[in-house]
Image: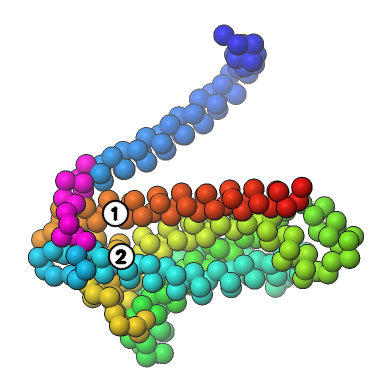
Amino acid sequence: MSKKMKQKLISYRNAPLSALLALLVFLAAAITFAVLLFLIIYILVKGLPYISLDLFSPTYTSENVSLIPALINTVIMTLLALVIAVPLGIFSAVFLVEYAKKGNKFVEVIRLTTETLQGIPSIVYGLFGLLFFVTSLGWGMSLLSGAFTLSIMILPLIMRTTEEALKSVPDTYREGSFGLGAGKLRTIFRIVLPAAVPGILAGVILAVGRVVGETAALMYTSGTVAQVPDNIMGAGRTLALHMYTLANEGLHTDKAYATAVILLVLVIGINMLSTLAAKKITKGNGNGEN
């Protein structure tokens, strides 16, 4: 037994409560990992046997229930929602952290609003999108209506994660930039934002995961048409909505599980690519500083 391990055992004997808390933390981590592992294995076991070439046909029919149109719609929907929400979320966070004065009542109202928006159920966003984008603006059931609805959903998430990422950047970075004669705007875009990129990307990853897995809000805004529309004003279902529709109909439950496998692989792939990108950007910033 190592010396470090012996010291830990001695400290735990002297403080039984610390040992209990350490055990609870370990159990919580183990249970979380076990649940995640169980979900992944369950989906793979249920879905892998039913993955076939028919699922990847270019067009959807009632026989092949192809997921390719839904996959394309998912990519389009995700890109549209991110194009709308990411700039707004990042610039709003920059204003809150870099420009707004501490103790500003307006800032407190904004933070309270974002926290409230994060807690609203997605079905409420769907009803809002139906009443405003689909009906009032006359966009109808379309990818654009769904993208705007999803952008409102993920905007608070991107704002808060970006805000925390900007706060984590040491003030010495800003002071050093100001000392070299750089202005406020140049300091933010050349020093602060690059240093906060990993945290910002973490928020974007979470936002992508919510967009890819959303169904309730899209049922009322983007529609459930199983084809790729000619333009963003056309209706179309995403991959999660495609899986929900197949399971709800009860005719192709096996294909729904197969679609769940593809959705799982897609989400894991997005997380891995984003993590690699964040590491590469962080490494590049470190080399640049040296």
Pick whichever, 190 or 114, lies toward us. 190
Q: Residues within 10 Å of mark 1 (few under 14, many from 20)?
A: many
Residue at image point 57% right, 9% down: 1
Pick whichever, 247 or 195, lies toward us. 195
Name the residue type under label 1.
Answer: Ile
Q: Mark 1–mark 2 contact, CB under 8 Å?
A: yes
Residue 184 image point, x, y percent:
80, 69
Image: magenta residue range: 45-56
Whether residue 103 appears in this view of the structure is no
Q: Secondary structure at mark 1?
A: helix
Q: Which mark is residue 211?
A: none
Q: Which mark is residue 71?
A: 2
Find the residue positioned furthest to the top. 1
Name the residue type under label 2.
Answer: Leu
- Most common SS among magenta residues: helix
Residue 129 image point, x, y percent:
40, 78
Q: Which mark is residue 262?
A: 1
Residue 19 image point, x, y percent:
56, 21
